[in-house]
Image: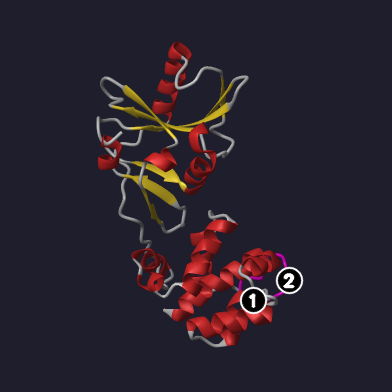
Amino acid sequence: MHNKLALIVAYYLARFDRYGLEMLGFISFNNAFVEVAERLGVRKNYVKLRRDEFDFVFPWRQGWKRPMDKQILHVIEMFSDLDEPAVRNIVLKILENQEYQKSEELSIMLQVLQDNDSKHTGNFILRAPTGRKAEEYFIKYFHDNHMPVNGFLKDTRDLGCGYDFEISNVDQTTFIEVKGLSEDAGGVTFTNKEWNTALASGKAYYLVLVKNLNEDPEILFIQNPAFKLKAKQTFYATLQVQWNISENDLRGI
């Protein structure tokens, strides 16, 4: 197991290079190799060689140009959708938290790194996702009712902002994330970027939940959802970090 943990740390060092080194608090790569090896109980050269195996993908060094083995490919695939803070968070827990090494979260990641083609995914399933249907319902509802706030509605769905729409007026800009359920009940899923944007935006961020879309739609506005709702962080084979809010938690709103 410790070799696989070292592989994840090596990936971070390879992908983010000297910036990653600084963010982990190491003064040099040699210092990083020594410290990581000591904390994880592996050889220093193992950490370095694993870092070097990512040279084919990341352009910081001249590096190796040999074919990558399956574990290297799996790590790249698993973490490719995560930004630097998200990967760093995982790496720091690996290096500094012994209990994390026993966690279900880490167990899922380690299963992905097995030398086979199976993919292990998290166990949360979004019930009856409705996507564009819920978003289009919200657009019409907003134009008819000017809620949750009045202003100019801007579609940001294709911009990767961490929300679907902006509403701007002379006083403020409000961020809108729309989630839909085809039935009256169910949980919803946030991507890591959506949840972090909600955390950073506070009261300027709304979750717009459109329920029962297939029959008689009902719309619910939840201001500052990152404060009001309890989310559980889960990881998937491609490691897109998501924050899940249960049906029971939504009932309390």
The residue most toward the top is 144
* Residue under pointer 1: 52
Q: Position of residue 196 (x, y in %)?
A: 51, 46
Q: Position of residue 129 (x, y in %)?
A: 35, 36
User: Where is 14 relative to 172, above or below?
Assistant: below
- In-front residue for pair 110/186: 186
Horizontal placement of 84 versus 183: left or right?
A: right
Q: Was residue 229 drawn as part of the magenta stretch in this picture?
A: no
Q: Which residues are magenta?
A: 53-63
**Residue beneath the point at 42% across and 42% down:** 227
**Residue beneath the point at 53% across and 57% down:** 86
The quarter of the displayed image where residue 131 is located: top left
Dot placed on the residue nearer the N-terminal end, 2 or 1 = 1
The answer to whether residue 12 is visible is yes
* Residue under pointer 2: 61
Residue 212, disc: none
Horizontal placement of 220 versus 184: left or right?
A: right
The quarter of the displayed image where residue 47 is located: bottom right
The answer to whether residue 57 is visible is no
Q: Are marks 2 and 1 in contact (CB under 8 Å)?
A: yes
Label 2 crowding class (10 Å Cα cut-off): few <14, some 14-19, many 20+? Answer: few
Label 1 crowding class (10 Å Cα cut-off): few <14, some 14-19, many 20+? Answer: many
Q: Amino acid at mark 1?
A: Asp
- In-front residue for pair 38/241: 38
Q: Amino acid at mark 2?
A: Arg
- SS of the residue under disc 2: loop
User: Where is 31 relative to 22, above or below?
Assistant: below
Q: How far apart in space, not on screen, are marks 2 and 1 (Cα)?
A: 9 Å
User: Where is 222 relative to 42, above or below?
Assistant: above
- In-front residue for pair 71/219: 219
